[in-house]
Image: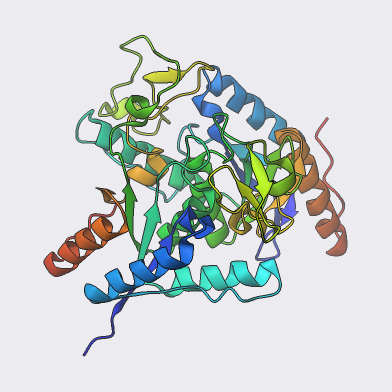
Amino acid sequence: MASKQTICLCTPQRYAPDWEQQRQRYQRACEARGFALLEPDCAGQRVEDDFHSWMEAVRRCDILVGDMNNFRGWEPDSGACFVLGAGYVWGKKIYLYLDDLRSCAEKFTEEKYQDKPGEQIDITAPENQNKGTVSKGWRDKEGIVLENGPLNLMMSAHAPMVEGGFEEALERIQQDEEGGAHRCL
Amino acid sequence: MFVDKNGVVRRPVAYLAGPDMFWPNGMEIGAGYVELSHRYGIDGIFPPDPAREDQYREYTPVDNSQEELEKKIFTHDMNQIYRSDMIIANLNDFRRGQEPDSGTAFECGAAWALGMRCYAFMEDIRPLVERFSGAKYQNLEGRWVDGQSYLIEDRGLPYNLFLGVPFTFVQGTMEDAMKRARADFDRELAAAGYPPYTPEG
């Protein structure tokens, strides 16, 4: 029998007071769907050892799951994003989950304004092939762009995003594994 | 100039990461960064800069949809990382929160996994617990937590261990980070028996 696929979860819920209960719940959810939750061995005395244990777990896992809910502001946990970046270049299957899949611009509840329409370039035009492009649209009161997707595009452009929590992401992973259909750029 | 992984002395290519292009004058900020990099013997790439002619292929969008635009920008930016030797990241807290720009954090992870030299700059590089500007208090165990009772990582680093361990943090601006990288490269050049970098003219 093939060994279980391992899942590494990146979430700032690790900082939550009830993390241990959450972790046990996620572990059971993985087992119920035939996966194993791969936890890093972070008993190191030195912070460098913990970092390397973590990255070793990321390197070993089959599937990376990122909790992309806002954390202490309008951005997801930067540690999770770092891990996803490393996992991407290592060719890991990546799944993201968050409570709300509306665009960052729609979700933003503070003051915002919109760029003049027509400033977006035609990205299909051959002369724009090698040009860099910057998202335009809504901006916050300081003029800082609000993405038109649910997340910063470095996350959303390449990985399936699931509305919901870890369990919903697992359900999607199981469907994709059975159907052999993981979309990844 | 720097000594690369193969022992060759050449100009390091630096991916200049950060949310700077999101500002209304983002392209001018980026052009300024690239110009600065040349003063320190570094070949800076601002992510939206045009692709260079090399082995990395751009994504060809089939239409002007949001999904296709994201794939184009993502592929373009990843290519800019692949062609770099180092990253210099603007990790200042973003949009009045306690975290840096998430796209930049993703790029930092990619750069680290590719074995690149990792530098970051911030206005305040004190340990996270000290510089944390939101509500914080010590719980019954004496550990620092935020207003939702979530732990504030207390490992003596400016951010969580993922960014905190692999990055060299420089207090100040992009230019301060470039100065630091230049000093490190010059030390390595000297150790390998080469003269330090001298700006042209």
What colouring method underlies this structural image? rainbow
Q: Nearer the viewer, residue B46 or A107?
A: A107
In the figure, is residue A131 to the left or right of A180? right
Q: Is residue B20 above or below residue A118?
A: below
In the displayed image of the protein, which residue is found farthest to the top? A116
Quadrant position of residue B126: top right
What residue is drawn where x is 57% and y is 36%? B18
Q: Nearer the viewer, residue B80 or A178?
A: A178
Q: Is residue B33 above or below residue B71?
A: above
Residue B153 location, x and y as percent?
Answer: 64, 55
Residue A114 location, x and y as percent?
Answer: 38, 13
Check the picture and name the quadrant holding the C terminus of chain B.
top right
In the figure, is residue A68 to the left or right of B157? left
In the displayed image of the protein, which residue is found farthest to the left? A179
In the figure, is residue B86 to the left or right of B126? left
What residue is drawn where x is 74% and y is 56%? B156
Q: Is residue B109 above or below residue A112?
A: below
In the figure, is residue A9 to the left or right of A164? right
Residue B127 location, x and y as percent?
Answer: 74, 49
Number of residue marks? 0
Residue B81 makes an appearance in the image: yes
Q: Nearer the viewer, residue A182 or B195?
A: A182
What residue is drawn where x is 12% and y is 65%? A179
Residue B89 location, x and y as percent?
Answer: 62, 42
What residue is drawn where x is 23% and y is 74%? A32
In the displayed image of the protein, which residue is found farthest to the front? B140
Residue B114 makes an appearance in the image: no
